[in-house]
Amino acid sequence: MQRLPFLPIYMPELLESDCFLHGDPRLVRAALHMQQAAWAATPPGSVPSSFEKLAEAARLTPAEVELHYSVLTQGWSLEDDGRLHHPRLGSLAAGLEDRFGAQLDVFAESAALACQGGDGVFELVSTEAAAKKAPKKGKRECPKDFSPDKASLASIIDAGFKTVEQREWLLTRFMDYVRSNATRQADWQATFRNFAGSRYTAQDFSVRFGHLPGDVTRTAVSTSSAAGRLRSAIGGERPTFAAQAAAKNSSAMAAAAERIFGAHQSA
């Protein structure tokens, strides 16, 4: 994807990430640097997983990468090739390559010539390249009537989507994701299972249902009561947006609330 100079950023993903809510703004820049490096990498959507190489991509030190590794790699997965892969960027890059590969090559070359100036007039994309490139064998668009098969249904139930309401919510979120990415896959059932098991899906699930998938003992009461005790401890004032977001999305905030509450109680 080096041929395309623009990094496609999905803002809900960024705004809900741990790095965006972190107190150190450098982590937001580091996360974007990682995505930029992944977008230009081969294979697209991947970066090296070692602290040293990841530090180069994130523009941090290896020690900083090691300290914040879980935050920086949120949403990434370590694959068999030993690299960290970003599912959204990888799927988008594959879809663009499948649908517009030839056009991208010619457009990149023509754009480079256009940047040099000159009085010549030429087409940015040739007539031959404008013909739609056939998708790779086996890959297809997601069926509009997609639904989980028996294996996928058993998998998501085992992953914690126990009720019909939760499974319907999951399928709706998945189809929204498919429409927003317009990608092609060889195995949509596997893509659905991966989506169900992603950290972002678990985050959205916890916002909707008040607990993580399958975690029936830990409900929204735990985080909301922690935030409530924090509010009481500081005199009844409403916590800041950052405090509320952290209390909802981070177990670390819940622990901090407990410590603050205990300190005020002992005082």
Image (cartoon, helix red, strand yellow):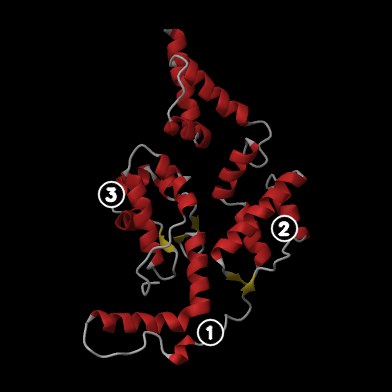
The reply, left or right, for residue 229 in relation to residue 154 is left
- Report the residue marked by disc 3: 61
User: Where's residue 130, x and y in %?
Assistant: 47, 86
**Residue in the foreground of this view, choosing between 247 and 158:** 247
Q: Split into 4 quadrants, where in the image is the N terminus?
A: bottom left
**3D distance between C-alphas at marks 1 and 2:** 33 Å
**Residue type of the residue flagged with mark 3:** Thr
Residue 165 in sight from this viewpoint: yes
Element under label 1? loop
Element under label 3? loop
- Report the residue marked by disc 2: 152
Sort mark 3 into few (<14), some (14-19) or many (20+) by Cα contacts within 10 Å: some
User: Where's residue 32, x and y in %?
Assistant: 37, 54
Residue in the image at 22% along x and 83% along y:
117
| Residue 37 position (above or below residue 20) | below
**Residue type of the residue flagged with mark 1:** Lys
- Report the residue marked by disc 1: 132
**3D distance between C-alphas at marks 3 and 2:** 41 Å
**Residue type of the residue flagged with mark 2:** Ser
**Which image quarter: residue 144?**
bottom right
The reply, left or right, for residue 152 in relation to residue 135 is right
Foreground mark, 3 or 2, reads: 2
Number of numbered markers: 3
User: Where's residue 223, x and y in %?
Assistant: 56, 28
Residue in the image at 49% along x and 57% along y:
78
Q: Split into 4 quadrants, where in the image is the C terminus?
A: top left
Residue 194 in sight from this viewpoint: no
* N-terminal label among 3 and 2: 3
**Which image quarter: residue 42?**
bottom left
